[in-house]
Image (cartoon, grey):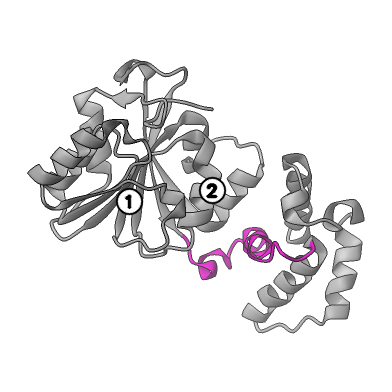
Amino acid sequence: MEKGIISFGQHYLENVQMQETLINSADLKKDDVVVEIGAGDGRITRLLGKKAKKVVAYEIDEKTKDVLVELQKEQPNIEIVFQNFLEARNLEGNKLVSSLPYQITEPFLEKIKSFSQFERITLLVGKTFGKFADENASQKISKLYLLFRCYFKGEYICDVAKENFNPPPNTMSSIINIYPKAKEDLLSQPSLYVMREVFEQRDKKVSNALREAIIRLFAQQNVVKTKRETKQLLQENFSDEIIDNYLEQMNNDQIAILFAQIEKLFN
């Protein structure tokens, strides 16, 4: 696990200036409804409640339940939900703030990509994940990286040294903002458009998902590609050992090869 975040390990952000940076990065308005993931002992929740119309804070660790219940009484615009956020079905709100445990970054992105109402998502994360928000940073292609790029655009805010937490974690953290992307936003980046289609058709073999993705991409440009033509494209540009798989069965190296072959198709 990459630490530097509020989780069951409970590394609390104590530096007041960094707390303010996190809150200010969310750009909260009086009519905002904020979802917070990982209320911890409520120190960030309290600050959110002073800025927003309402805060719905999720916490899975009941060690701080008494403190959070008392906070809810003190600030009636705060609602504490003792539930795993990943199991929540309905989410109200237009902003989201979280100190996100590294081990749930992929399931978090998988879940949150379906909730397009979040106009801004402000995260305190491990620095490795935080680098995804910097488009100029050198990145190793992975499933998590591509999931991020296909569904979100990022804004790097700052790094947070481990000395700002109590107890100090093992690694540096970062504050970032991420913003949902519509599929139409990817039309100028065809390789990401096709990769997103593959993510959305993961119940199909990659070859079938690719064929449909390419047909849809060209249709957006008013160009008709037949299944036969697309099959020929796949045969000429993709290796069978890569696309004759299901996405969930592929490791990061295979996914990196797949994406490289998609990029080659459009370059």
User: Horizontal placement of 2 versus 255: left or right?
Assistant: left
Residue identifier under label 2: 107
Name above or below for residue 230 compared with residue 245: below
Please tell me how crowded label 1 is: few (under 14), some (14-19), or many (20+) other residues with Cα within 10 Å: many
Q: How many marks?
A: 2
Residue placed most toward the observer, 37 or 254: 37
Q: Nearer the viewer, mark 1 or mark 2?
A: 2
Residue identifier under label 1: 96
Q: Which range of residues does the magenta coloring cover?
A: 181-205
Quadrant that contains the C terminus: bottom right
**Residue 190 painted magenta:** yes
Looking at the image, which residue is at 23% across and 58% down? Answer: 33
Name above or below for residue 252 compared with residue 194: above
**Residue 60 painted magenta:** no
Please tell me how crowded label 2 is: few (under 14), some (14-19), or many (20+) other residues with Cα within 10 Å: few
Residue placed most toward the observer, 74 or 163: 74
SS of the residue under disc 2: helix
Looking at the image, which residue is at 49% across and 66% down? Answer: 182
Looking at the image, which residue is at 86% across and 65% down? Answer: 234
Quadrant that contains the N terminus: top right
Q: Earlier in the sequence, mark 1 or mark 2?
A: 1
Q: Residue 187 falls in which quadrant of the image? A: bottom right
Q: Which mark is residue 76?
A: none
Name above or below for residue 120 compared with residue 165: below
